[in-house]
DNA sequence: ATAATCTAACTAACTAGTTAATTATATGAA
DNA sequence: TTCATATAATTAACTAGTTAGTTAGATTAT
């Protein structure tokens, strides 16, 4: 028979983890911080194990929070994942939209966009993993992804399509189909970080070292520039 | 209490799904085909739901096979997934290595490689999804991924690094770090297929139509050419 | 017969989510 | 200032449902 009804010595409730150095989140005081800790832990857990593989217990543990609190702040696992997606993509949008709405000339605007996108991912190398997992799901796109697409990607995509048209008309860009060019760029930026663990074992280099990331950034901008800009 | 001990009317064993049109695999006759059917179903299931989300019941059902047969051919879910990885990557290696071992001049060899890679993925658009999920797991790379890396990626990577050196020395390629160039190329090729569902909802086009794939292929070769080849 | 191929039914373990409290703080009346 | 109290924040322990994997046997070609 399995070990149901564990007879562990019970601590008096509400005073768990007495001697810990952790600042004892929650207990009326740091609700914002508890929520944030849960979200942060969720990002890590979803990134590591995917939507289905992520364990709510593990998230709660990593956030130093009781599991029920997770359901107090977020309706269920799915809602939590949705919050993670919003966190990731609203962050991206916040970095990238100002650039796209600026009045820079096409060439410069494109370079600024690439840099902003790259920097955001480089600062949060886990994010690609969080996304990809769901990204590529279900033939027509789940209702959830539909929402994310409309809320975050459509506006960015529109601006970028405008930028491409503008640059092409000005004779600065080669003629490219946005449907081909834009996912290619995202692929170049994102894939490196996804493949980082693999590269670490294959080569003997740390693909995420500061120096490497600096080189990588330069490479990406150069790579895309050569493919897009008219010489 | 849950519905344990279901009292469904039992069919005589060994004669399940009587009136079905399915060719009734197995029962001493088509062991190869049963195995293949399981593997094929597993590819689809792992692609759609990831390692953790994939359901062995669903795989068995899709393969028109009893679940226990799945464990007869494959030790466990993990082993099945490993078989899926081997299937996917050995196929890739088979397409790509002959090109890399040929005696074509660098420029042409690179284009042939790109085309071969692209065609393999285009013919199996589910494969990127199967891989990515595991691809980007666990900081240092799981023991499983370690194996896959050594068996499939290292030889391909070596040949490609040689090709790059050769092309650079011949003055045909710009000077690029393989660590930057190669993952970029893979990203460009793969990402489009992963993002296909999303693009389908965002735009009103089928990203996987024959015509679209033809265009995409040309774009990818051109995109990479401009970034790599000296003009 | 017998060994390879295949199956219905089962179980042990896991996991998302719930429940019924418990604690701390802010608020406000006395 | 003090004390009751509402309520926001938090928890230990539990449960219902799911799922990987097993068992004990049934077919069937040779």
Image (spheres, coloured by chain):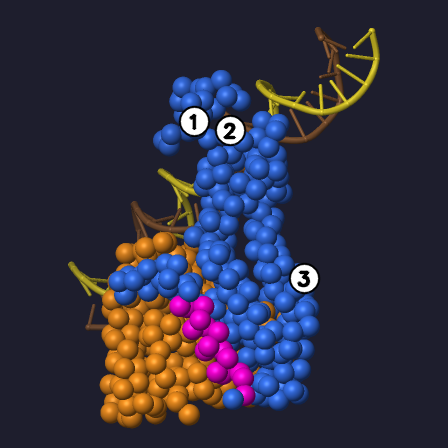
Chain colours: A blue, B orange, C yellow, D brown
C4 with respect to A68 (left or right): left
**What separation in Å lies between label 1 and label 3 (alpha carbons)?**
42 Å
B209 with respect to B131 (left or right): right
- Subunit bearing disc 1: A
* Numbered mark located on residue A181 in the image: none
**What residue did someone put label 2 on?**
A24
Q: Is residue A59 visible?
A: yes
- Disc 1 vs disc 3: Cβ atoms closer than 8 Å? no
Between B7 and A66, which is closer to the camera in this rendering?
A66
**What separation in Å lies between label 2 and label 1 (alpha carbons)?**
8 Å
**What separation in Å lies between label 2 and label 3 (alpha carbons)?**
36 Å
Callout in the foreground (2, 3): 2
* Numbered mark located on residue A20 in the image: 1
Count every numbered label the image shows and give the total.
Answer: 3
Secondary structure of the residue carrying tag 1 is loop
Q: Are marks 2 and 3 on the same chain?
A: yes
Q: Are marks 2 and 1 on the same chain?
A: yes
Residue A207 image position (x, y, % from top left): 36, 62
Residue at figure coordinates x 28%, y 90% from the top left: B170
- Disc 2 vs disc 1: Cβ atoms closer than 8 Å? yes
Q: How many other residues sit within 10 Å of disc 2, few (<14), some (14-19) or many (≥20)?
A: some
Q: Is residue B5 visible?
A: no
**What residue did someone put label 3 on?**
A151
Between C5 and B225, which is closer to the camera in this rendering?
B225
């Amino acid at each position: 028979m399995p070990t149901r009804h564990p007879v562990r010595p019970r601590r008096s409730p509400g005073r768990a983890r007495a001697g810990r150095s952790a600042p004892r989140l929650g207990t009326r005081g740091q609700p914002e911080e508890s929520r944030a800790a849960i979200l942060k832990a969720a990002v890590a857990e979803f990134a590591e194990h995917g939507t289905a593989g992520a364990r709510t217990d593990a998230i709660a543990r990593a956030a130093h929070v009781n599991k029920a609190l997770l359901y107090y702040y977020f309706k269920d696992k799915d809602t939590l994942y949705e919050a993670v997606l919003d966190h990731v993509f609203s962050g991206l949008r916040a970095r990238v939209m100002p650039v796209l709405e600026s009045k820079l000339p096409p060439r410069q605007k494109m370079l600024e966009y690439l840099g902003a996108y790259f920097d955001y991912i480089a600062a949060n190398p886990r994010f690609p993993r969080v996304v990809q997992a769901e990204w590529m799901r279900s033939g027509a796109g789940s209702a959830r992804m539909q929402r994310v697409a409309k809320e975050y990607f459509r506006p960015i995509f529109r601006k970028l399509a405008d930028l491409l048209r503008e640059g092409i008309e000005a004779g600065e860009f080669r003629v490219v189909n946005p449907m081909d060019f834009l996912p290619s760029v995202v692929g170049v930026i994102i894939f490196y970080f996804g493949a980082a663990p693999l590269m670490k074992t294959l080569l003997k280099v740390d693909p995420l070292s500061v120096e490497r990331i600096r080189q990588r950034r330069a490479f990406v901008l150069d790579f895309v520039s050569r493919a897009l800009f008219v010489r």
